[in-house]
Amino acid sequence: MEERQILEFEKPIVELEKKISDMMDFAAGANLELSGEITSLRNKAERMRAEIFSGLTRWQKVQLARHPRRPYTLDYIEHITTDFVELHGDRYFADDKAVVGGFARLDKRDVLIIGQQKGRDTKQKLFRNFGMMHPEGYRKALRLFKLAEKFRRPIVIMIDTPGAYPGIGAEERGQAEAIARNIREMAVLKVPIVIVIIGEGASGGALGIGVGDRVYMLQYSWYTVISPEGCAAILWRDAAHAPEAAEALKLTASDLIEQKIVDKIIPEPPGGAHTDHKRAAESIKQELIATLDELEAIPLDRLLRERLDKFRRMGVFKE
């Protein structure tokens, strides 16, 4: 049986939940009536969870976004779509396993759904390259975007990456050019695009498939120009300062709503998406259905104009 991985701030909740489980087993085995005590402990656990999660630091939210049991793109595809047909390859170099995508049925609508995919064990992590895309991954994504445009299918994108792969081979094959091309082409794709940041959203690695009409974030995801560790290594020359960097970067969903970088926060189940994959997926599904209904009613010329304006408005500058 796989050992449950627990974050430090989750431990008091997990310990209380174990006590509840042990009490239930004891009551069943000894044929005792302990429902009152069990209910009291459950209420205590809920209050403790609400208290802990209402006061999370930015760094703790980063840890939640990286939780090893957090649902990934393929988990959400399984829960929210039917008839998923995965498409492979960029038709130039290779099939990048760090990104998955294909056509699927979302409720009563055909969509293209695509996103970065991480792995859970060492073998999967290496196979998926930790969710870090190569240039061929961005070119694969663009090929699928163009297919969606051709067949007039809306696009759903799930972002979960620590960044684009920074290796020499990736640079030799045009990593920066591939990301830049995607940003340019996505700005004018003639179909609705909805983006959901489901975990980590770092730098150009995220933005390379991150231009759309609506950008949503799960409650405990993060989105910024660089990872906290990368920022700490630059500013303090020590990745141990990552918690301080996370505070300075203002990378959480609530920060980015305030800065008008993202459009909406999708709530997660109490304790985070990893505690209930199905419930987290249902929240995303309902938001996607409502948003696509809204976007498909907008005339195409206005949709494209508003998409460009959305990204032009980002940031603060002086002339």
Image (cartoon, rainbow, N blue to C red):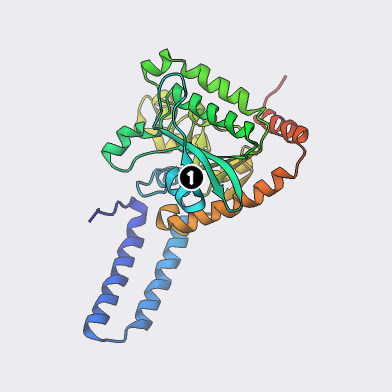
User: In the picture shown, does residue 48 fall above or below 137?
Assistant: below
In the foreground, 217 or 289: 289
Q: Position of residue 32 (x, y in %)?
A: 27, 86
What is the quadrant of the N terminus in the image? bottom left
Q: Residue furthest top?
A: 172
Residue 92: percent from the left, percent from the top? 45, 19
Determine if residue 200 is in view: no
Q: Quadrant of residue 272?
A: bottom left
Q: Residues within 10 Å of mark 1 (few under 14, many from 20)?
A: some
Position of 174 relative to 47 (above/below): above
Question: Which of 309/20 is in front?
Answer: 309
Q: Is residue 170 above or below residue 208?
A: above
Q: Residue at x 32, y 83 (%)?
A: 34
Left or right, 298 with reference to 247: right
Q: Is residue 136 left or right of residue 217?
A: left
Q: Secondary structure at mark 1?
A: strand
- Residue at 40% over, 44% down: 63
Q: In the rendered image, which quarter contains the C terminus?
A: top right
**Location of residue 157 (image quadrant):** top right
Residue placed under numbered mark 1 in the picture: 84
- The percent position of residue 130, horizontal first and vertical second, equals 36, 34
199 sits left or right of 237 in the view: right
Mark 1 residue type: Phe
Depth check: 248 or 29 in front?
29
